Structure formats: C-alpha cells, structure tokens
Image: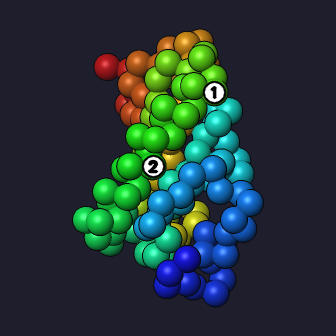
C-alpha cells in the first residue's frame, strides 16, 4: 500500500483478503454484504472521497470494477445485474472514510420490484 493512515481499516488490509488488485487499487468482499459476492474496490492511497482520486486512480478502480464484474458473473450465473455506487460523506452514509466503490451483484427476484434501483436510498423516491 502507498500512503497509509494508521487507524484506517482499508490501509491495513491483509493480502489474503484481496480478491483483485492492480498497481493503484485492490478489491475485497464486503464484510457486511448487501447481496452475495458484494465487492469493494478500494484505492491504495488513503483518500476519504471519490472526488479526491486522481485520473490514474479512477482508471485503476474502474479496471477492477470491470474485471470483477466478469469474475462475479463467471462465478455465479444467477447474477444478471449490478449496482455500482460510492458513498461520499457521513450524510450519504459513508462509515469508513477511505474511498471505496461498491460493486453489488443483483439477481432476478432479490427484491419484489427493483425499479428505481438506488433511488430507494430515500424512501418514496424509488418508484416513478
């Protein structure tokens, strides 16, 4: 890892937990998954916000998102959709202040009506 913050869970990640890695980012399975195979893509440099990432870090994270999307679909043929998201700031639900991107596999029937997707973060905004 590059720049580290002593108390940061993601800066001190054990290598054996990694499910993907490149020069500037790595991936792990989420410790509190929304769905099976929910994966986090994490820049190696300690930054709290997605908006602080360099262009190279954005490209590295995106490369892992795409690689892991294929890996997850190869591993579980019931996956037929994904939510990709980032929480930036406490108001948006961020709890670990080291940037991370959620790659959440979705399966037909995992919720009664998926219409609206991430709009369901705010009650009443999902169905339109």
Q: Which residue is drawn at 41% across and 40% down?
A: 66
Residue 92 drawn at (x, y percent): 44, 56
Tell me whether the residue at label 1 lies in contact with that at label 2, contact meaning CB atoms closer than 8 angstroms: no
Local crowd at mark 1 within 10 Å, few (<14), some, or many (≥20)? few
The residue at the far front in this view is: 23
Point out which mark residue 64 bears. 2
Residue 2 drawn at (x, y percent): 50, 81
The residue at the far left in this view is: 55
Query: Can residue 81 be spotted in the picture?
Result: yes
Q: Is mark 1 on a helix, strand or loop?
A: helix
**9 left or right of 119?**
right
Residue tagged by mark 1?
75
Residue 11 drawn at (x, y percent): 60, 75
On screen, 19 above or below 79? below
Q: Which residue is drawn at 53% across and 58% down?
A: 21
Q: Quote the CA–CA distance across marks 1 and 2.
A: 16 Å
> Tag 2 or tag 1, which sits nearer the N-term?
2
Quadrant into which the N terminus falls: bottom right
């Amino acid at each position: 890892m590059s720049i580290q913050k002593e108390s940061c869970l993601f800066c001190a990640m054990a290598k054996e937990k990694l499910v993907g890695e490149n020069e500037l980012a790595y991936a792990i399975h989420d410790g509190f998954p929304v769905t099976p195979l929910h994966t986090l893509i994490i820049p190696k440099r300690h930054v709290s916000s997605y908006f602080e990432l360099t262009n190279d870090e954005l490209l590295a994270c995106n490369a892992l998102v795409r690689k892991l999307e294929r890996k997850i679909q190869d591993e579980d043929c019931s996956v037929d959709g994904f939510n990709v998201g980032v929480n930036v700031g406490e108001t948006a639900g961020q709890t670990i202040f080291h940037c991370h991107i959620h790659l959440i596999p979705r399966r037909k029937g995992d919720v009664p009506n998926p219409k609206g997707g991430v709009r369901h973060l705010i009650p009443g905004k999902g169905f339109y």
